[in-house]
Image (spheres, rainbow, N blue to C red):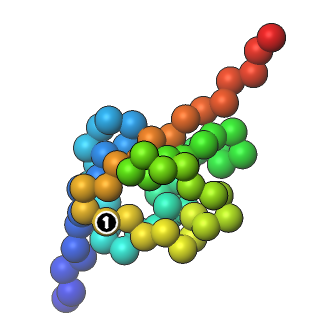
Amino acid sequence: MKKIKKIKIKVNGKVRTIQDKTNLSKLVKILKIPIKKVAIELNQEIIDKKKLNKIMLRNKDSVEIVHFIGGG
């Protein structure tokens, strides 16, 4: 049986352990985040949502997910 490699990343300041070879799109699904209402930053760089499937997370990556809040 093959052991699944795990990596540690930071999500909004909290360390999380996830499977290696997880992309940003999968992380958003795991966290149950409504993708239309957030901005995603990876290592202090804003990510184009069209590229979430292509961006693989690596050990010690830092992800910030910012929710948009309406108001007036």
Please indicate whether residue 38 sits to the left or right of residue 10 in the image.
Answer: right
Give the answer, above or below, for where 55 lies relative to 72. below
Q: Residue at x 66, y 30 (%)?
A: 68
Q: Amino acid at mark 1?
A: Arg
Give the answer, above or below, for where 25 lies relative to 32. below
Q: Residue at x 55, y 35 (%)?
A: 66
Please indicate whether residue 2 sits to the left or right of residue 47 in the image.
Answer: left
Please indicate whether residue 50 sits to the left or right of residue 8 in the image.
Answer: right
Decide if residue 30 is in sight here: no
Q: Position of residue 30 (x, y in %)?
A: 48, 54
Give the answer, above or below, for where 14 lies relative to 45. above
- Image quarter where the N terminus lies is bottom left
Q: Position of residue 47 (x, y in %)?
A: 56, 55
Residue 59's image quarter? Answer: bottom left
Q: Position of residue 48 (x, y in %)?
A: 63, 58
- Image quarter where the C terminus lies is top right
Residue positioned most to the front:
45
Decide if residue 35 is in sight here: yes
Residue positioned most to the top:
72
Q: Residue at x 63, y 40 (%)?
A: 38
Please indicate whether residue 24 sits to the left or right of residue 69 in the image.
Answer: left
Q: Which residue is mark 1?
A: 58
Residue positioned most to the bottom:
1
Look at the numbered disc 1 and give the secondary structure of its residue.
loop
Residue positioned most to the right:
72
